[in-house]
Image (cartoon, helix red, strand yellow):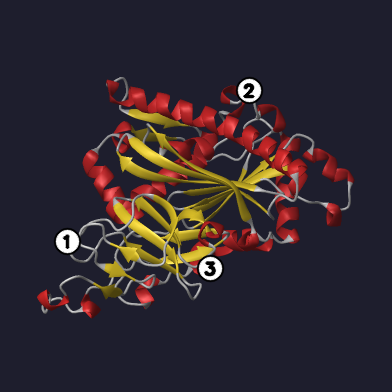
C-alpha cells in the first residue's frame, strides 16, 4: 500500500477513535435459507465459484517443473501443473478416454500423467503422448484428446484458478491485475508476489461457506469471542472499510495507534499499529499483519459443509531456528483465534434448521458482512 493511502487510513482511524464512533451501515436480515437450500447452493457453485478466481495454493508449492497439485474446487477435479518450460497450466483431472482421474488428491512431482485405468499418457502440457492400441481409436485423434484446460494465473504469491473448462488459449488466461484491482496493488507494493509459504493446511468445516466470511468481515464479536486471545490488541468494534466492486478492505486499528498523532505524518506506518483484511470475492481472505500474512480460501461442498485451505505467507524462508520459532508463535496465535471463529460458525450452522428463526440479524456495525451477502445475492440473481 502506498504511504499516502496508509496515512489517509490512519487519519480516518484517529478521527473515529477521538469521536468514540465506528463506521456503520444499514442493519439487515440474513435469511437462514441462504445456508440450507440445496437449489441455492447449486446456483452459488455455477454462478459464483465457476466464474471467479480462487486462490488454491502458494506459487512456491509449484516451483519446480513437474510439480503438480490435484485438488477439487466447486465440484471440479483440477490438476495444477508447472510445465518443463516453467509455465503454470491448469487441467481437469480427468482422462479423455473414459474419464478416470489421472492423479489422486495431493501434491506430487510428475514427468508425465499416466491414467491408471488404460494407461493413456499425457505430457505436462496436457497433450496426449501415447495410448495402448492406437489403431483402435481412429475416431479419437490425439489432437482432440488433450486434457481439458482450466483458467489459471499467479498473483500475490498464490496460484488462482477458475474451476471451469476453458475454450482456447485466451480463455485459459486470467487478468489477475484487473481482477484484484487497487487492493491487489496494495499487496504487490508490500512484495507479496515474492512471499513464500511458512505453513499450509486444509481442514473440513461443518458450516456453510459464507459463515466464515460473516465472522471475519466484522469486529463486533472480538470482545466476546476472542476475549482470551486477540481482543485486547484492538479497539472494540472499530474498523475502517473500503470497497471496490465485490472486494473489501478492512483496516483494524490496534490499541496505541493514537500515539502516531504525536509524530510527523511522514513517520506513520500501518505495520505495528494495525491489521488489514483483504477479502477478494468470492472466497479468498488475506490478513496482512505487517511483516507476514495469513490467508484462507473457503470451498463449498454442500449447503452445510465446506473445506478451508489456510496458508501463512512470509517474506523469505526462515534463515535459522530462531526465525522458525518466531513464525511458529505468530502462526499459533493466529490459528488459535481462527479456531474460535470456526467453532462458533459450526455452532451457528447446527441451529439453523431448527426453525427457531427465519433470519439472522446483522447490526449496523456488521455492514461489511451485509455487503458480502448483497454481493453474493447479486451474483446468483
Distance between the alpha carbons at the discs numbered 1 and 2: 54 Å
Residue 194 visible in the shown view: yes
Q: Residue at x 42, y 62 (%)?
A: 110
Mark linked to residue 177? 3
In primary-sequence order, the first of circles 1 and 2 is: 1
x, y percent for residue 304: 32, 34
Vertical comparison of 139 with 69: above or below? below
Is residue 281 found left or right of 148 in the rendered image?
A: right
**Picture quadrant of residue 166:** bottom left
* Mark 1: secondary structure: loop
Residue 26 visible in the shown view: no
**Picture quadrant of residue 100:** bottom left
Vertical comparison of 28 with 164: above or below? above
Mark linked to residue 98? 1
Q: Which residue is mark 2?
A: 227
**Front-lying residue, 328 or 275:** 328
Amino acid at each position: 500500500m502506498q504511504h499516502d493511502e496508509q496515512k489517509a487510513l490512519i487519519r480516518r482511524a484517529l478521527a473515529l477513535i477521538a469521536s468514540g464512533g465506528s463506521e456503520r451501515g444499514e442493519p439487515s436480515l440474513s435469511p437462514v435459507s441462504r445456508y440450507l437450500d440445496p437449489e441455492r447452493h447449486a446456483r452459488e457453485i455455477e454462478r459464483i465459484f465457476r466464474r471467479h478466481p480462487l486462490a488454491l495454493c502458494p506459487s512456491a508449492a509449484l516451483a519446480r517443473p513437474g510439480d503438480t497439485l490435484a485438488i477439487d474446487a466447486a465440484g471440479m477435479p483440477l490438476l495444477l501443473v508447472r510445465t518443463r518450460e516453467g509455465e503454470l497450466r491448469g487441467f481437469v483431472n480427468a482422462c479423455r478416454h473414459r474419464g478416470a482421474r489421472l492423479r489422486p488428491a495431493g501434491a506430487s512431482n510428475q514427468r508425465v500423467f499416466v491414467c491408471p485405468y488404460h494407461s493413456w499418457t499425457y505430457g505436462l502440457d496436457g497433450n496426449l503422448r501415447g495410448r495402448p492400441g492406437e489403431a483402435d481409436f481412429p475416431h479419437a485423434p490425439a489432437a482432440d484428446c488433450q486434457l481439458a484446460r482450466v483458467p489459471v494465473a499467479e498473483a500475490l504469491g498464490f496460484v488462482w484458478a477458475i474451476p471451469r473448462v476453458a475454450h482456447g488459449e485466451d480463455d485459459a488466461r486470467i487478468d489477475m491485475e484487473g481482477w484484484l484491482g487497487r487492493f491487489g496493488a496494495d499487496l504487490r507494493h508490500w512484495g507479496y508476489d515474492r512471499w513464500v509459504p511458512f505453513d499450509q493446511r486444509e481442514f473440513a468445516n461443518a458450516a456453510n461457506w459464507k459463515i466464515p466470511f460473516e465472522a471475519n468481515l466484522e469486529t463486533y464479536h472480538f470482545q466476546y469471542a476472542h476475549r482470551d486471545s486477540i481482543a485486547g490488541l484492538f479497539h472494540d468494534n472499530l474498523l475502517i472499510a473500503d470497497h471496490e466492486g465485490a472486494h473489501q478492505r478492512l483496516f483494524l486499528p490496534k490499541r496505541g495507534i493514537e500515539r502516531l498523532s504525536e509524530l510527523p505524518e511522514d513517520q506513520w506506518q500501518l505495520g505495528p499499529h494495525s491489521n488489514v483484511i483483504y477479502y477478494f470475492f468470492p472466497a479468498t481472505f488475506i490478513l496482512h499483519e505487517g511483516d507476514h500474512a495469513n490467508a484462507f480460501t473457503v470451498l463449498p461442498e454442500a449447503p452445510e459443509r465446506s473445506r478451508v485451505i489456510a496458508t501463512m505467507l512470509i517474506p523469505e524462508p526462515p534463515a535459522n531456528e530462531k526465525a522458525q520459532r518466531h513464525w511458529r508463535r505468530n502462526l499459533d496465535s493466529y490459528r488459535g483465534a481462527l479456531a474460535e471463529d470456526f467453532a462458533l460458525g459450526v455452532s451457528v450452522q447446527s441451529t439453523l434448521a431448527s426453525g427457531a428463526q427465519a433470519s439472522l440479524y446483522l447490526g449496523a456495525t456488521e455492514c461489511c458482512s451485509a455487503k458480502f451477502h448483497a454481493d453474493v445475492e447479486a451474483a446468483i440473481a
